[in-house]
Image (cartoon, grey):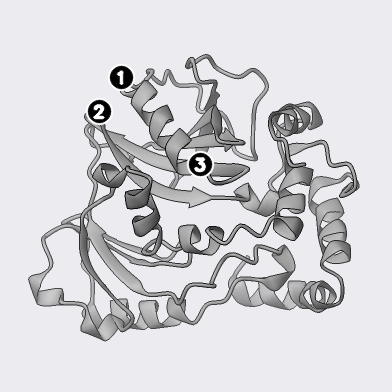
Amino acid sequence: MNNITKNIILFPFNILYKISPEADLKVLFYLKQHYKLNLKNPKTYNEKLQWIKLYNKNSLMPKCCDKYTVREFVEKQECGEILNDLIWEGFKPEDIPFDNLPEKYVIKVTHGSTFNIIQDGTAKISRDEVIEKCNKWLKAKFLPCYGEWFYGVEKPRVIVEKFIESADDEQLRDYKVFCFNGKPKMVRVDTDRFTKHKMDFFDCNWERIPNAGMGYPISGRKIEKPECLAELLEYARKLSKPFIHARVDFYIVKDKIYFGEITFTNGAGFDRCSSYEFDLKMGNWLQIK
């Protein structure tokens, strides 16, 4: 579904959110999750994510949702060594120093998860096209009806970062560490994100979590335990410490850990789990009151 169609369909919900955020999220939740949202006594993971959106107003969240301003937070948490190299940042894509960029790089707009242009050394990228795309993305607003108030608070900008290459010529694996009340409990490994997205779920001992799922199929492939798993979990612990819940994303290349991003409401709390039981299992990990 393209953004124009999505905005048209969700327009009435944006109006409802202004009138009553609770009512809006209850309706959307039922439509997407197929069970009623209980805000007075939330039990499942996705119910508690709705509670976080409505009632948890941690002032650090807007800063940590922005791909540039989060860098300062990562430094303050004594994790600066895992930040990717920043080549350039600014508010005007016309100012990107195209003639001085390396052979490989990634251009991102800092307030969206899909606003990326990847130059892997083979792509033909037009300067005018980059400027046009970035200017369009900079104007993009998050849907109010989803209730993720912390996105777009920081003024979005454009950043250029070093291109991180995988060690095996395959797409980078995305290691997403789900932390509850400052403690890592689960690692989701996302693979083939740009083709046929797959997910695998592990506990902190790298044992597969049975019957786990979040909308995409399990890969079925053997995913080796990272040699740096303990270090990865320690970084996740440090970065999630100020929040009741955070999903901290990393890349690993030849045992070197790179920070990706921090997310507070995975899938806006609307991504359906493989079962109600798994939704409840994760909900039991999270203490919100």
Residue 227, numbered label:
1
Tell us which disc is closer to us: 3 or 2: 3
Q: State the residue position of label 3.
A: 240
Callouts 2 and 1 close, C-beta under 8 Å? yes
- The N terminus is located in which quarter? bottom right
Residue furthest toward the left? Answer: 100
Between the residue at mark 3 and the residue at mark 1, the CA separation in whole angstroms equals: 22 Å
**Looking at the image, which residue is at 43% across and 28% down?**
233
Q: Please state which of residues 235 and 271 is positioned toward the viewer in this rendering.
A: 235
Please, is residue 116 above or below residue 202 in the view? below
Closer to the eye: label 3 or 1: 3
Please tell me in which quadrant of the rendered image residue 137 appears: bottom left
The residue shown at (47%, 63%) is 63
Up the image or down, 262 lies above or below 199; here it is below
Query: In the rendered image, which quarter is residue 85 located in?
Result: bottom left
Residue type (three-letter) at the residue carrying disc 1: Glu
